[in-house]
Image (cartoon, rainbow, N blue to C red):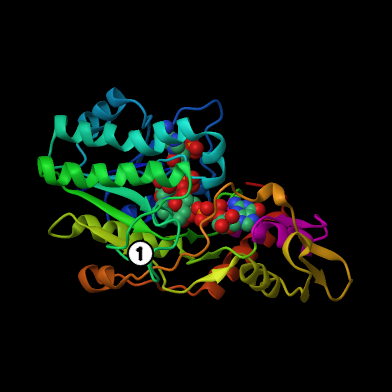
Amino acid sequence: MKKAIITGVTGQDGAYLAELLLDKGYTVYGAFRRTASVNFWRIEELGIDQHPNLHLVEYDLTDLSSSIRLLQQTEAMEVYNLAAQSFVGVSFDQPITTGDITGLGPVNLLEAIRIVNPKIRFYQASTSEMFGKVQAIPQKEDTPFYPRSPYGVAKLYAHWMTINYRESYDIFGTSGILFNHESPLRGQEFVTRKITNSIARIKLGKQDVLELGNMDAKRDWGFAKDYVDGMWRMLQADEPDTYVLATNRTETVRDFVTLACKAADIRIEWQGEGEAEKAIDTSTGKTIVAVNPRFYRPAEVELLIGDPSKAREKLGWEPKTTLEELCQMMVEADLRRNKIGFSF
Ligand code: NDP
Ligand code: GDR
């Protein structure tokens, strides 16, 4: 029976990847960080928390000895490193913590692999944030990087270290440059889930206004469940490599709000520009979406759109879910949760 380690199993992708690998018959070691109140709501929502082949193990990515023990005790031959301080906004306020976890953290795992068993296959969760300031459209594996946040810079370091361990020590280190991927399990600090949860609450009369930052930012949004399948395919390939996963469609934050309102059956009209921009509910005349500059970032990534051709050709990977389907799924989940008072 195949064994795999997933770091960051309490996160969005960790939960979906655990579900996928369990379905494929793997024994999964879900590595989670010890905190005062660990929260397993995502794997509970997927109904896999009691699965006999899922073993939850305490682990911290910033600790080399913890990484060595994890590999020795589990004897897993596939490691999916999804753990990170992954919120771009927070990385501006906590650049050093972000560097420690998101940048240096993966090197602990790479070193542990080098020490324990260099044949272990390693997946690094790299990101389109490494492209940052637009250098080319669409972005693909050979597009020059220009990160625009401490998070993007930290991820770029880990990306190059994965390649360096591949070239220096012949370690199967693969880097997946994934564009934004969302789901009903997305954390509420990220813009799509913030929007779908707020629109659901507005629909149910539990919230008046949704405040957002930069509405013009454009993102290539896919469905997380499609993307974890791509991660698995990358570690089944003959050789380690670097792959972009994306949908090749880009929309603004404003467009996503419009889609979410449509999914909740709220008719809106956009008015004003810049900080005065707002969306009015046409049936009540009330402002339900407004700009709050508090959510602006010191440096912004204006436009992301990825070209996943290499993953399609070499891995047979394709995104299956449209943005409309994704948004509908998220709004429906948030309507359902808010009706019963669920708030994660
Ligand atoms: P989440 O923020 O939902 O999950 C991050 C996970 O990392 C959480 O389980 C968190 O645990 C864990 N973690 C944080 N610090 C540590 C630590 N020191 N030791 C162990 N675990 C830790 O992220 P996603 O699931 O959305 O993303 C997964 C990975 O993919 C991340 O690395 C992210 O940067 C990257 N990525 C994500 C994209 C996306 O659009 N979702 C796109 C491209 C890359 P805890 O619950 O304790 O906080
Ligand atoms: P991102 O995702 O920074 O792309 O990183 P996020 O959803 O946080 O922001 C997307 C865009 O929306 C704009 N925005 C807002 N963002 C948030 N969070 N809150 C707001 O109120 C708001 N208003 C406008 C942002 O400025 C930005 O342009 C995500 C994370 O999952 C990373 O870990 C991952 O690597 C990248 O996606 C790919």
Q: List x then y, in percent, for residue 33.
A: 44, 31
Residue 40 in picture, x, y percent from top left? 51, 41
Q: Residue furthest top?
A: 65
Question: In percent of the image, x 30 and y 70: which residue is there?
Answer: 317
Report the amino acid beneath label 1: Leu
Give the side of residue 321 with respect to residue 17, left or right.
Answer: right
Q: Residue at x 60, y 70 (%)?
A: 328
| Dot 1 alpha-carbon crowd within 10 angstroms: few under 14, some 14 to 19, many 20 or more | many
Residue 30 seen in render: yes
The boundaries of the magenta stretch are 190-214
Q: Is residue 67 above or below residue 129?
A: above
Residue 58 percent location from the top left of the image = 39, 29
Q: How many marks?
A: 1
| Residue named by callout 1 | 245
The residue carrying mark 1 has its beta carbon less than 8 Å from ligand 1: no
Magenta-colored stretch includes residue 18: no
**In the rendered structure, does residue 191 fall within the stretch colored magenta?**
yes
Assign ligand 2 to one image quadrant. bottom right
Give the vertical position of 43 relative to 116 (above or below). Answer: below
Left/right of residue 217 with respect to residue 72 in the rendered view: right
Q: Relative to 27, say whether 279 is above or below.
A: below
Foreground pick, 195 / 75: 195
User: Residue 122 falls in which quadrant of the image?
Assistant: top left
Q: Is residue 290 left or right of residue 232?
A: right
Front residue of 9/103: it is 103
- Quarter of the image where one finds residue 90: top right
Residue drawn at 23 percent across, 68 percent down: 315
Secondary structure state at the residue bearing disc 1: strand
Residue 193 visible, this angle = no
Q: Could you say where residue 62 lies in the image, as x and y percent from the top left?
A: 37, 29
For this view, does 261 lie left or right of residue 127? right
